[in-house]
Amino acid sequence: MTTSIEINCSFKEMMDVDLLVENPRNPNIHTPQQIELIAKVVKYRGWRSPIVISKQSGFIVCGHGRLQAAKLLNARSVPVDIQEFKNDADEWAHMIADNKLAEASKLDNTILKDILEELDSGEFDMDVTGFDSMEIEKLMNQVHQEINEQELDELLDTENECPKCGYEW
């Protein structure tokens, strides 16, 4: 069975998933749960990013998880972008940076909570946000607790003040 997946990204060509070669030294590990979530998002939204292949090595540089998700979805082909790199070091650095830079960002939990609450109408599969139901529940409880603690702090009388900076406690 082949799943028809919408393509919503720029790409150079469609390639058979069986012809793609994962980089054997890719340090990024994808859990089965993550692959299932990626597959769910791809099935819902379609392809939003192609798999990047190195013209020099023929290996996948970016998109190992997307390839595994495509296989889970029984897709025969995927959109790919074939890119040239200056040398092996440039290719390796790009693969590492693609994974590392994404994890270096920080979410504003208050804004995220507001957006997730708007999306949570009961008619929308919240998993396609990339968060599972347990993560969403934890986030909602954490942000609610942070807001309550801030309100309590503002209500507390202060007895002391730092003469240098004015901090009250």
Image (spheres, helix red, strand yellow):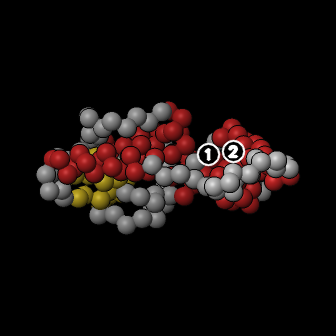
Q: Earlier in the sequence, mark 1 or mark 2?
A: 1
Residue topped by disc 1: 131
Mark 1 to mark 2: distance in Å?
10 Å
1, 118: nearer the viewer: 118
User: Would you call the spot at circle 2 few (<14 residues within 10 Å), some (14-19), or many (20 or more)?
Assistant: some
Identify the amino acid type marked 2: Leu
Q: Residue at x 33, y 49 (%)?
A: 97
Image spot of residue 78 (x, y percent): 37, 53
Image spot of residue 31 (x, y percent): 48, 33
Identify the amino acid type marked 1: Phe
Mark 1 or mark 2, whichever is nearer to me: 2
159, 46: nearer the viewer: 159
Q: Residue at x 48, y 52 (%)?
A: 105
Q: Residue at x 26, y 34 (%)?
A: 24
106, 162: nearer the viewer: 162
Asked whether the residues under the numbered discs 1 and 2 touch, taking CB atoms below 8 Å apart as contact, a structural biologist would say yes
Q: Residue at x 30, y 38 (%)?
A: 26
User: Would you call the spot at circle 1 few (<14 residues within 10 Å), some (14-19), or many (20 or more)?
Assistant: some
103, 131: nearer the viewer: 103
